Image: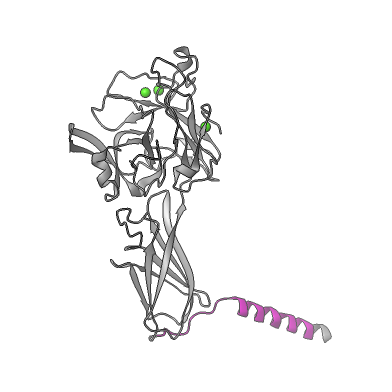
């Protein structure tokens, strides 16, 4: 008898415990509540052209999750960055605002608010950037080795998978950005990066033939050749993982190293980047457009890559000169003070760290480190 009473008590305690811990189903909608949320970006990543640095974010997603009931709502901010929450269950809510800047960067903001017996309350959520890209540009070796014959042909780019799952490089694009003054005036107002060169990994975007394993580094050489045969201090890139191969010119082709191909027809140059300053972008390759642009040097073909598809981008050069890559991809610049033909390189101080600011994220390293940190 005693045992039975004890069991019933235990069952009742468990039932009570489950009841008190499980969110309840909502009872009814409270028609009186009205709560307005304004979503604001102060980082400049939503609209770099807005010098006020207080941009109302249109098109942000706002999720409202009740902290007491099994109930959530999804809203979208209007053109004035506003969401009016009404006709919802009176409750406390966690509000999460989200705006994607690119594949690699998003703006997020959240707060917990009480939407109970409120009318005409206006609240603000401020957004902060977070970095999402699993694969990063980890090193750019651009300055050339120590030499006095203007040799710089051993350039390479290194990528790193900082995630805990495999990334597939199939169809991804690496570009050299257009950083000229003519484009600088536009770069923060358009939704694409304009590129002088764009080369594409083999495979199709979304495919899984070219894996990059967690913690793995890969090297993409301008030419996968042992350059130390030409200049003693130059890098042996004969074992690079990939090479840039321009099918529109008589480019060097190491048959053992798979090629990234040029996607801008008639651009007859190999993937050489500036020895002092430049910008490089990695995009997922899902979308791009080759366009003819009238410039002060005549009509030229460029490749426009939507910022929404960009995984990472790095600008390098003197910090005192104007930015050439939009703030949305890189708010800083790596490699300040690095001299041409110094044999030095720029590499992430921490291969897992990307704050969207290459001034902070990168450091100058004395010698190239192709395929390792
Ligand atoms: Ca090449
Ligand atoms: Ca090859
Ligand atoms: Ca390295």
- Ligand 2: image quarter: top left
At x 46% / y 50%, what residue is drawn? 132
| Helix, strand or loop for the magenta stretch, by majority | helix
Is 68 drawn above or below residue 103 in the view shown? below
| Front one among 45 and 2 | 45
Is 131 drawn above or below residue 145 in the view shown? below
Most distant residue in the front direction = 320
Measured as percent of width and height from the top left, residue 372 is found at: 55, 31
- The answer to whether residue 337 shows anywhere in this view is yes
Scheme by which the image is coloured: one colour
Most distant residue in the right direction = 2
Most distant residue in the top direction = 229
| Front one among 145 and 212 | 145
Left or right of 366 in this view: 79: left
Image-quadrant location for residue 251: top left
Image quarter of the N terminus: bottom right
Measured as percent of width and height from the top left, residue 146 is found at: 47, 19
Q: How many marks?
A: 0
- The answer to whether residue 226 shows anywhere in this view is no
Measured as percent of width and height from the top left, residue 230 is found at: 44, 13
Image quarter of the C terminus: top right
Left or right of 76 in this view: 8: right
- Magenta span includes 371: no
The magenta region covers 5-30
- Magenta span includes 19: yes
Measured as percent of width and height from the top left, residue 19 is found at: 61, 80
């Amino acid at each position: 008898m005693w045992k039975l009473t004890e069991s019933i008590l235990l069952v009742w305690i468990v039932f009570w415990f489950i009841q008190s811990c499980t969110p309840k189903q909502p009872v009814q909608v409270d028609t009186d509540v009205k709560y307005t949320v304004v979503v604001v970006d102060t980082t400049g990543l939503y609209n770099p052209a807005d010098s006020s640095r207080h941009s109302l974010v249109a098109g942000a997603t706002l999720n409202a999750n009740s902290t007491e009931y099994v109930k959530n709502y999804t809203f979208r901010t209007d053109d004035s960055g506003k969401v009016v929450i009404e006709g919802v269950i009176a409750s406390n809510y966690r509000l999460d605002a989200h705006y994607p800047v690119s594949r690699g960067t998003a703006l997020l903001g959240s707060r917990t608010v009480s939407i109970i017996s409120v009318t005409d309350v206006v609240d603000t959520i401020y957004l902060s950037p977070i970095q999402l890209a699993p694969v990063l540009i980890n090193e750019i070796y651009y300055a050339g080795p120590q030499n006095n014959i203007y040799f710089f042909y051993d350039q390479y780019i290194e990528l790193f998978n900082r995630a805990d799952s495999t990334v597939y490089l199939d169809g991804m694009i690496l570009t050299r950005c257009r950083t000229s003054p003519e484009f600088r005036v536009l770069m923060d107002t358009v939704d694409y990066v304009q590129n002088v060169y764009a080369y594409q990994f083999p495979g199709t975007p979304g495919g899984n033939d070219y894996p990059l394993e967690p913690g793995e580094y890969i090297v993409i050489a301008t030419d996968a050749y042992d350059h130390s045969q030409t200049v003693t201090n130059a890098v042996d890139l004969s074992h690079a993982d990939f090479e840039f191969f321009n099918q529109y010119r008589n480019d060097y082709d190491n048959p053992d190293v798979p090629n990234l191909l040029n996607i801008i027809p008639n651009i007859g140059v190999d993937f050489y980047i500036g020895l002092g300053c430049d910008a490089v972008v990695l995009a997922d390759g899902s979308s791009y457009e080759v366009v003819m642009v009238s410039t002060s040097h005549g009509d030229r073909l460029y490749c426009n890559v939507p910022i929404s598809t960009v995984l990472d981008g790095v600008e390098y050069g003197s910090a005192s000169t104007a930015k050439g890559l939009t703030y949305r991809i890189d708010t800083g610049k790596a490699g300040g003070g690095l001299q041409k033909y110094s044999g030095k390189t720029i590499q992430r101080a921490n291969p897992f760290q990307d704050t969207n600011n290459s001034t902070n994220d990168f450091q100058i390293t004395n010698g190239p480190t192709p395929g390792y940190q």
